[in-house]
Image: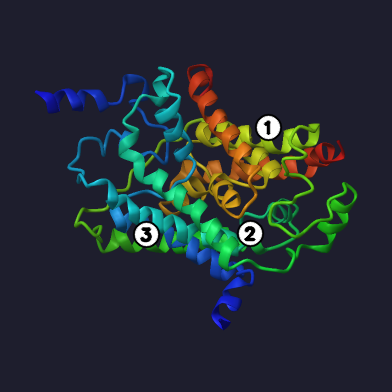
């Protein structure tokens, strides 16, 4: 009985039934309620290490630099296009290989891919994020890395981004999707 | 010691890009996770300020891994600052240097320009727009778009998702527009 209640509680509400979020997998109806392995909290430490690795790469390849982002948007340097392009190439190749050979996760689970439907938010939100990217010179990942490198004032930018996310959630019913 | 010096130089795109790309299979193999950063902001809202908003009513604890990931990114920044810091100023295109000089941006010591982003400048009109308004747009826009550079441009494109291609083109279009046509007005303030 108790477990049933728990399931009810995390079931997405009708409003969320179609998950427009490309990044929040647990909200996808397709993956919802599938046998997801339950692990103790410390299993998450591996993601912490993945984050450290990613953070170091972001800083050392200067992706977190406001100057590099300005160069990119002025077509003055190939650097950022090379970084994003080669990252996508490696990503595509790996996803293709994972699908082709039906590679499983380290816990033996089959790896799931969920296709998403287009909604107008992809354009409107995309443009608004582009505006913010050009101003701050940072997407969300680099914000965290910038704070780490000692640019403590960026914690205000991060707080403001959290507020922006909250505001989106607040006015979501009134926005075209 | 040599290796530390070698690692401390800026990494070229053909080193950084592929390593970033490896995050995609890395997270999939480690636990069936899709690469994406901006959703961490949503989980923070869901955990701290849900305010009965339906968008934040979900079991954010199931996405806790994402908060571990972004904490790691912050730690990665600290690791570089402590051990792998490049002592040289950032080398950028001379055209950009000339342009930015007009606006009094001459300090290339940090990856984040201290002339624009500092506690001291935070409450000036320019500093406020750059730090606070810019951040707000990043948070609002990424969630409205359903993802950011990592979730759409890297993960989404890797999985050949059409909406992610549309989103990525929109990111770039918005960035080109503001960087070239709007930012000069902001920097003049």
In this view, A117 is above or below A53: above
| Res. B133 mark | 1
Q: Is residue A125 something one can see in this rendering?
A: no
Q: Which residue is drawn at the image coordinates 48% and 41% (left, top)?
A: B163
In this view, B86 is above or below A55: below
Question: What separation in Å lies between label 2 and label 3 (alpha carbons)?
Answer: 21 Å
Mark 2 burial class by Cα count in 10 Å: few <14, some 14-19, many 20+: many
Q: Chain of mark 1?
A: B
In this view, B156 is above or below B13: above
In this view, A42 is above or below A123: below
The residue at which mark 2 appears reads as: A80
Residue, far bottom: B2
The quarter in which the C terminus of chain B is drawn is top right
Q: Position of residue A27 (x, y in %)?
A: 33, 33
* Quadrant hosting residue B55: top left
Task: Please tell me whether mark 2 sits on a helix, a strand or a loop.
Answer: helix
Foreground tag (1 vs 2): 1
Residue B151 relative to residue B171: left or right: left
Foreground tag (1 vs 3): 1
Residue, far left: A1
Earlier sequence position, callout 1 versus callout 3: 3
Mark 3 burial class by Cα count in 10 Å: few <14, some 14-19, many 20+: many
Residue B131 relative to residue B24: left or right: right
Q: Chain of mark 2?
A: A
Mark 1 burial class by Cα count in 10 Å: few <14, some 14-19, many 20+: some
Asked if badge 1 and badge 2 are on a common chain, one would say no
Question: What separation in Å lies between label 1 and label 3 (alpha carbons)?
Answer: 34 Å
Task: Please tell me whether mark 3 sits on a helix, a strand or a loop.
Answer: helix
Q: Position of residue B179 (x, y in %)?
A: 75, 44
The residue at which mark 3 appears reads as: B25
The quarter in which the N terminus of chain B is drawn is bottom right
Q: Which residue is drawn at the image coordinates 49% and 55% (left, top)?
A: B75
């Amino acid at each position: 009985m108790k477990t049933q209640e728990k399931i009810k509680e995390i079931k997405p509400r009708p409003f969320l039934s179609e998950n427009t979020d490309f990044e929040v997998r647990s909200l996808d109806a397709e993956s919802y309620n599938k046998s997801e392995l339950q692990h103790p909290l410390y299993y998450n430490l591996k993601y912490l290490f993945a984050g450290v690795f990613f953070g170091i790469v972001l800083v050392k390849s200067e992706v977190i630099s406001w100057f590099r982002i300005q160069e990119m948007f002025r077509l003055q340097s190939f650097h950022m296009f090379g970084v994003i392009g080669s990252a996508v190439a490696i990503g595509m190749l790996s996803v293709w290989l994972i699908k082709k050979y039906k590679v499983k996760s380290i816990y033996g689970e089959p790896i799931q891919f969920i296709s998403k439907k287009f909604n107008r938010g992809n354009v409107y939100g995309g443009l608004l994020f582009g505006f913010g990217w050009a101003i701050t010179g940072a997407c969300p990942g680099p914000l965290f890395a910038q704070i780490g490198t000692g640019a403590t004032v960026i914690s205000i930018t991060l707080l403001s981004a959290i507020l922006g996310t909250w505001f989106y959630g607040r006015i979501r019913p009134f926005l075209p999707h | 010691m040599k290796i530390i010096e070698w690692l401390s130089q800026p990494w070229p795109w053909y080193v950084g890009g592929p390593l970033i790309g490896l995050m995609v299979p890395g997270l999939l193999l480690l636990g069936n996770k899709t690469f994406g950063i901006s959703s961490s902001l949503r989980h923070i809202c869901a955990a701290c300020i849900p305010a009965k908003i339906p968008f934040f009513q979900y079991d954010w604890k199931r996405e806790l891994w994402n908060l571990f990931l972004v904490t790691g990114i912050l730690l990665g920044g600290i690791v570089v600052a402590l051990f792998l810091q490049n002592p040289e100023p950032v080398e950028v295109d001379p055209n950009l240097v000339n342009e930015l000089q007009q606006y009094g941006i001459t300090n290339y010591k940090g990856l984040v320009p201290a002339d624009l982003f500092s506690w001291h400048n935070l409450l000036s009109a320019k500093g406020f727009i750059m730090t606070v308004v810019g951040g707000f747009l990043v948070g609002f826009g990424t969630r409205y778009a359903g993802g950011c550079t990592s979730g759409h441009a890297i993960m989404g494109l890797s999985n050949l998702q059409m909406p992610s291609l549309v989103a990525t083109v929109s990111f770039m279009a918005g960035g080109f527009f503001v960087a070239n046509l709007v930012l000069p007005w902001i920097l003049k303030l």
